[in-house]
Image (cartoon, rainbow, N blue to C red):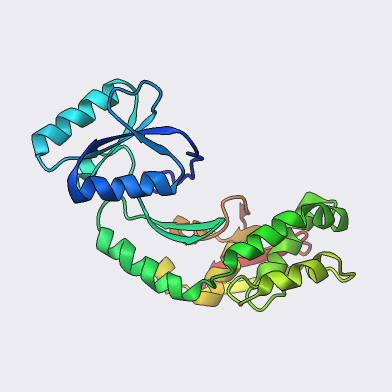
Amino acid sequence: MHSLPIFLNMAERPVILIGDGDMAAAKRRIIERAGAVPVAEDDGDARIAFVALDDDDEAAAAAARLRARGLLVNVADRPALCDFTLPAIIDRDPVLVAIGTGGRSAGLAKALRQRLETMLPARLGALADRLFAARSRIRARWPDADARRRAIDAGLVEGGPLDPLRDSSESAVDAWAGGERDPAQDRLVIIRLHSTDPDDLTLGQARLLGQADRIFHRADVPSAILDRARADALRACCATAPAKPGPGLSIDLEIA
């Protein structure tokens, strides 16, 4: 991972913007869209800065001045001078999807954003809001944190009652949160891989890896495959999965 993707709360915070013309106007729109306040270079409270200058030497000099003051700097169209880059953004407030290429290709990020835009329902943000409003009921129904996470995962899975890619899934939150049947089920899924290339994973296999609570794998399974699992999923290298792998979804992974 070449960068740490984070979301910063920039409401009412000053952000330095140096430059004019179309590039600077685009950066200004992004700054203001995030609720921040564009300010001049001499502002002493700013911690982030954007440089949008056509001249290479002027841009490099401005970035050096700002970085010497401890600011994180983005220099338009010059990835080598950037402390951070801006992703292509899909906005389903409060849901944000950011697509970055580390400055390699803004066109690729844009193309991916346009594809994903067609997949994500306009009311996806409403689902997030409804889940947030139902937190107390969700905690009451599933007091145990692990059970609660498994239940939420099961609710949001493709075809589940809260499937985020289905229109108006937010209307099902109240019934789901107050229901009597726990949709989370303990299970062990065996995955036999025919390739060590993570790009050869089927959609179903990739989805299972992303949902699993624990991964039992053989020593020859490459880290590139294991990296497709959730970051917090337990990973155990062993000859075979245990008879009782544990609650939630477990995967037994090996190369065929």
Drawn side of residue 28 relative to residue 32, left or right: left
The residue lying toward the viewer, choosing from 137 and 32, is 32
Task: Classify residue 50 as left or right of residue 114.
Answer: left
Question: Does residue 54 appear in this view?
Answer: yes
Q: How many marks?
A: 0
Q: Is residue 120 above or below residue 86?
A: below
Q: Position of residue 213 (x, y in %)?
A: 67, 58
Q: Residue at x 38, y 66 (%)?
A: 113
Where's residue 42, x and y in %?
A: 29, 22
Residue 67 picture location, percent across and down: 28, 26
**Residue 108 vs residue 184, the one in the foreground:** 108
> Is residue 194 visible in this depiction of the protein?
no
Residue beneath the point at 81% across and 64% down:
177
Q: Is residue 40 left or right of residue 7?
A: left
- At 69% from the left edge and 75% from the top edge, which residue is drawn? 160
- Residue 107 x %, y %: 26, 63
**Closest to the observer, 192 or 159:** 159
